[in-house]
Amino acid sequence: MGSGKHSNRKCHTLLPTAGTGSRLGGDLPKQFQQLAGMPMVSYALEAFKASAQIQSIWIGVSPSFIENPILRSIANIGADIHVVPTGGPTRQETVRNTLAAMMQSGIPEDDWILVHDAARPGITPTLINKLIDAVKESHVGGILAVPLADTLKQADLDSVVAGNIPHSERTIPREHLWQAQTPQMFGLKQLHDALENAIRLEADVTDEASAIELTGAKPLLIEGAARNFKVTHPADWELMQLLLTSSVN
């Protein structure tokens, strides 16, 4: 497996940034808001730029946002960065559209693509390289994830539907449960076709791995880190700001 074309597969990063981040609030989409002195997306950009294994970085934005001046300042960090107006109404469509643009640019179809949430600014070059090193000889791909530590409770549906305080109906065993993170690393055409199929089927895919799983493949689970959490709510923003301002990395 280490010989032939598979040993020459290069790695590229895809950052889908067309979301509005409405749950966090603010005038700008959350990924472009200032967090601990920089636009939030800049932390991921710098982490991928610091990995010698990453050949290029592609940022998929909403077509209506492509002329925003903040994009020029973000892209001007010296790496091979491409900002493309490939944003769609859903994350899956943004990623699919950006993958298509990457193929049209001449990137080989079997190169590796690392899709990462811009709202995970806690990513580090060490985690990126850990994922790449574990996955690069695989034909399937894999994702960063962490084993669940908390006890899981299933709420009773009647209370939830009625808008009442829910009751705990049962405890869900967590022995085999992992919480998915990003980056998620798959072959360019492999992922494009999996997403195309999921969109066509109107399947409920919430990340790249779930689209790959629909094809019958089983992505690797590479242990990530607690600091790589997703900033969604104001409390997440405050915690991440504390982490970034106190971290030496």
Image (cartoon, helix red, strand yellow):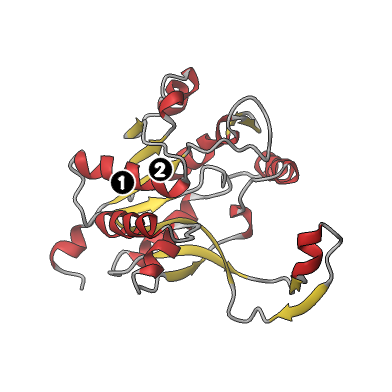
Q: Earlier in the sequence, mark 1 or mark 2?
A: 2
Q: Residues within 10 Å of mark 1 (few under 14, many from 20)?
A: many
Percent of width and height locating residue 107: 21, 45
Above or below, 81 against 11 in this view is above
Judging from the image, what secondary structure is the residue with disc 1 in?
helix
Percent of width and height locating residue 90: 47, 45
Q: Which image quarter: residue 58?
A: top left
The N terminus appears in which quarter of the rendering?
bottom left
The C terminus appears in which quarter of the rendering?
top right
Percent of width and height locating residue 109: 20, 53
Q: In this orientation, which residue lies closer to the viewer: 155 or 106?
A: 155
Q: Which residue is mark 2?
A: 94
In this rendering, position of residue 93 left or right of residue 80: right
What residue is at 25 percent from the left and 53 percent from the top?
10
Q: Residues within 10 Å of mark 2 (few under 14, many from 20)?
A: many
What residue is at 73 percent from the left and 46 percent from the top?
239
Three-letter residue code for mark 2: Thr
Q: Would residue 55 be seen by someone viewing this image from the given angle?
A: no
In this rendering, position of residue 182 left or right of residue 49: right
Above or below, 41 against 167 in this view is above
Judging from the image, what secondary structure is the residue with disc 2 in?
helix
Q: Which residue is mark 1?
A: 99
What residue is at 73 percent from the left and 41 percent from the top?
234
